Image: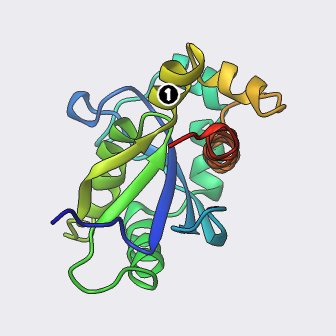
Amino acid sequence: MSKKLPDVLFGIDTETSGLDPKDGAQCLSIGLITVKNDADLTELDRLYLEIRFEPSRYTWSAVSEGIHGLSQSYLANNGLPMFSAALDIKNFIESFLREDEKIVLIGHNPAFDNKFFQQVCAAIGWEPPVSYRMVDTFSIGFGAMGLQNSNEIFDCVGQTRNAHNAMEDIEICMEFVRQVRRLVKNARTC
C-alpha cells in the first residue's frame, strides 16, 4: 500500500557562501513556508532567518555574495548565530510535524537546500527527518515547459528577480507549483 504525503509540506530555499557544505560553504539565510497538502497548497506559516557568517569555520565566495547580496559585514550585524537559527527552525518545523512523520521539501533544487538545512540543524545536534520524496520546481519546469533555470520560472509566474532572497525565491517556487497544478487540473483527462 502506498503512503500519502503528510498533511503539511515545507517549502525551502537557502542562500549560501558557496556551493557545497563539504567544501566549507555555510548557509547564510533560509526561507521556509509551510503549506497544507491540499489542492491550493494553502499557506500556513513562514519563517525567514539570516545567519551570521563564521569565517573561522567556513569559506566565503565573492561570486555567491554577488548572487544574493548578503555581505559578511551585514550578516555580522544582522545574522543570528547558527545555534539560535537551528533552534528557531526546529521549533518552527516541530510545530507542524506529527510524530513519526517525514519532512517533504518543496523548492527549486531542494536537494541543494537540504544539504545546508542539515548543516544548520547539526549546530544543535538535530537531524531533521527529511523524506526522500521532494518536489523540485526545476524538474517540473524543465519536464513540463522546457524551462532551463529559476529565472525562467520567475518569468513564468510574472515575477522579476533582483538579488536572490531565500524567502522571495521560495514564495515564487510555491506559486509556480500552484500554477502548474491549476494548468494540469484544467487539462486533465484521466
Q: Can residue 84 be seen?
A: yes
**Residue that badge 1 annotates:** 138
Picture quadrant of residue 4: bottom left
In the depicted structure, whether residue 74 falls above or below residue 1: above
In the image, 77 versus 178, the foreground residue is: 178
Picture residue at 32% right of the left edge, 37% below the top? 58
In the depicted structure, whether residue 95 falls above or below residue 88: below
Q: Is residue 159 left or right of residue 107?
A: right
In percent of width and height, residue 70 lies at 63, 37
In percent of width and height, residue 124 lies at 26, 71
What amino acid type is highlighted by mark number 1? Phe
Picture residue at 64% right of the left edge, 55% below the top? 77
In the depicted structure, whether residue 67 falls above or below residue 21: above
In percent of width and height, residue 167 lies at 65, 51
Q: How is the image coloured?
A: rainbow
In the depicted structure, whether residue 107 falls above or below residue 30: above
Q: Is residue 105 left or right of residue 156?
A: left
Picture residue at 70% right of the left edge, 43% below the top? 186
In percent of width and height, residue 103 lies at 33, 64
Q: Quick one: label 1, few (<14), some, or many (20+) residues within 10 Å?
A: many
Q: Can residue 147 be seen?
A: no
In the image, 19 versus 106, the foreground residue is: 106
Picture residue at 66% right of the left edge, 37% below the top? 187
Q: Residue furthest front?
A: 189
Task: Classify mark 1: helix, strand or loop.
Answer: helix
- Quadrant placement of the N terminus: bottom left
